Image (cartoon, coloured by chain):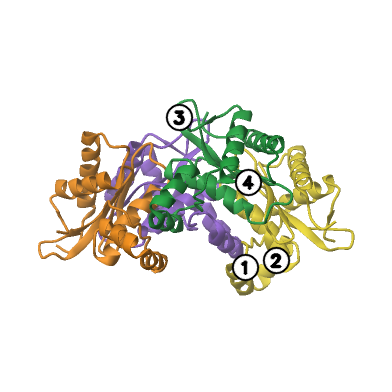
Chain colours: A purple, B orange, C green, D yellow
Amino acid sequence: MSQITLEQANAIIAGAFAKGREAGFKPLSVAVVDAGGHLISFQRGDGASFARAQIATGKAAGALSLGVSSRKVGDMAVERPWFIGAFASSAPHPVIPAAGGVIVVDGSGAFIGAVGVTGETSDNDEIAALAGIAAAGLAAQG
Amino acid sequence: MSQITLEQANAIIAGAFAKGREAGFKPLSVAVVDAGGHLISFQRGDGASFARAQIATGKAAGALSLGVSSRKVGDMAVERPWFIGAFASSAPHPVIPAAGGVIVVDGSGAFIGAVGVTGETSDNDEIAALAGIAAAGLAAQG
Amino acid sequence: MSQITLEQANAIIAGAFAKGREAGFKPLSVAVVDAGGHLISFQRGDGASFARAQIATGKAAGALSLGVSSRKVGDMAVERPWFIGAFASSAPHPVIPAAGGVIVVDGSGAFIGAVGVTGETSDNDEIAALAGIAAAGLAAQG
Amino acid sequence: MSQITLEQANAIIAGAFAKGREAGFKPLSVAVVDAGGHLISFQRGDGASFARAQIATGKAAGALSLGVSSRKVGDMAVERPWFIGAFASSAPHPVIPAAGGVIVVDGSGAFIGAVGVTGETSDNDEIAALAGIAAAGLAAQG
């Protein structure tokens, strides 16, 4: 398997939304990007503020651009804010350093894309991202 | 009715994709934006090239930014390329001057969002956009 | 085969340079990008002007972003300059609309990356790109 | 000697990669830029994440833009984050303030280019950069 299909991307989003409803989260927005960080599918929950596409995509693509979850990108931003600031301004896609962006891998561990969720606390965003990946029958980076 | 819901946006995309399949179009990508030009929903058809989000969003948001279809923005670009060139570089969203971006209106004619389609000829992109709006029970700018 | 390896990328560049020497071309610069348009390998020939990385990458990534060779992107720019101008300013990577950017495909025709060559006439740049792809045992988009 | 040749640049990269393999480093990516900070040669190791060109180039060009190693740029970022932040956003090339970017000098101490390495810890990136410069028979800024 070398890339996430649109059907899988939509299944990820449906799964993340289902988790949000079940858990009573605020309206979520979810982006799914391919291995190059380019958008495959995005949905913004009703009532969410208008720039959610940028945040969700920036968590997903930013994770891929450094090869770690956006939670770890967020940790790096706390430890070395100047590094992440400079990187974000030069990276090919937006880089949002906060949990909720999770890399999707194939059976060999190769990156096939990423999911970014925004709308709730970052911890809950990540829970929804992981739930969406599992709901689509895919695997998150370990 | 003051805005397009996520459910309506997804119905627009489903309707545009259905038209594409029925007509034998190449893989389409469809963006639905709110009245401010901000992304509500996007789907990129399998096999489409990677920058389709920018083109689809740029048709939809570009239409709203000038209050006419992206077909008319394209006509303006032929007549006054310097104007559209300068406008595009200063506008808050990308402006893609080619048919396929259609404004969605409510019963009073007020703008509630727009749809942008890319992947086929611009004429066919527009056919798919109009079909998607109709399939969702909404009205295109007259 | 889902992506171009570094070894293959360097073989492409060596093959393009060999063609350039054999044909008496001016100093070439060659970029190889992955399917997402991100740089894998680049070499600038001695004596070439300093912004060759941007041109070579912009031919390769620009081809992928629209799914056609940069020669066809160049044809589109002649026919609809406003469209390519607007697209280039919103695309995730630079888009250089001139021959010399060629998409590399796998056995099923799926895009696995692209090559961009600059330094000679655009026609000769394309000849070198095709020679490099062939030298690496890979296939150009038909 | 007034500039780094492509042959020397490739020797630097080969030397940095050899050090990485010998030391068991993660996949490295290496950029070599000329005295103006412009890319001569770049290679991204298989398995490295996609934005490595920006980081490697930003370490190398950022070092030259302030005339010190990117380790010292990183130290400046700790001491005066606002200065490096503002500088990075106005500089002609990306500026990545972390070790791994080393200036290359000629016999008189004049700058002839720089090397940027990314993929491992910043300390190890710098070790690989220095090894690459030495392997090419060149001298790092003292």
Q: Which residue is mark 4?
A: C120
**Contact between labelled residues 3 and 4, with CB atoms less than 8 Å apart:** no
Label 3: element kind: loop
Q: Residue pushed farthest left?
A: B107
Marking on residue C109:
3
**Height in image: B59 above or below A137?**
below
Q: Residues within 10 Å of mark 4 (few under 14, many from 20)?
A: some
Is A32 or C101 nearer to us in this picture? C101
**Contact between labelled residues 2 and 1, with CB atoms less than 8 Å apart:** yes
Is D100 or A22 nearer to us in this picture? D100
Marking on residue D65:
2
- Observer-side mark, 3 or 1, equals 3
Q: Chain of mark 1?
A: D
- Observer-side mark, 2 or 4, equals 4
Residue D38 seen from this side: yes
| Residues at marks 2 and 4, CA–CA distance in whole angstroms | 30 Å
Q: Residue at x 61, y 49 (%)?
A: D52
Label 1: element kind: loop
Marking on residue D91:
1
Residues marked 3 and 1, same chain: no
Residues marked 2 and 4, same chain: no
Q: How many marks?
A: 4
Kind of residue sitting beneath label 2? Ser
Marking on residue D81:
none
Q: Residue at x 57, y 57 (%)?
A: A76
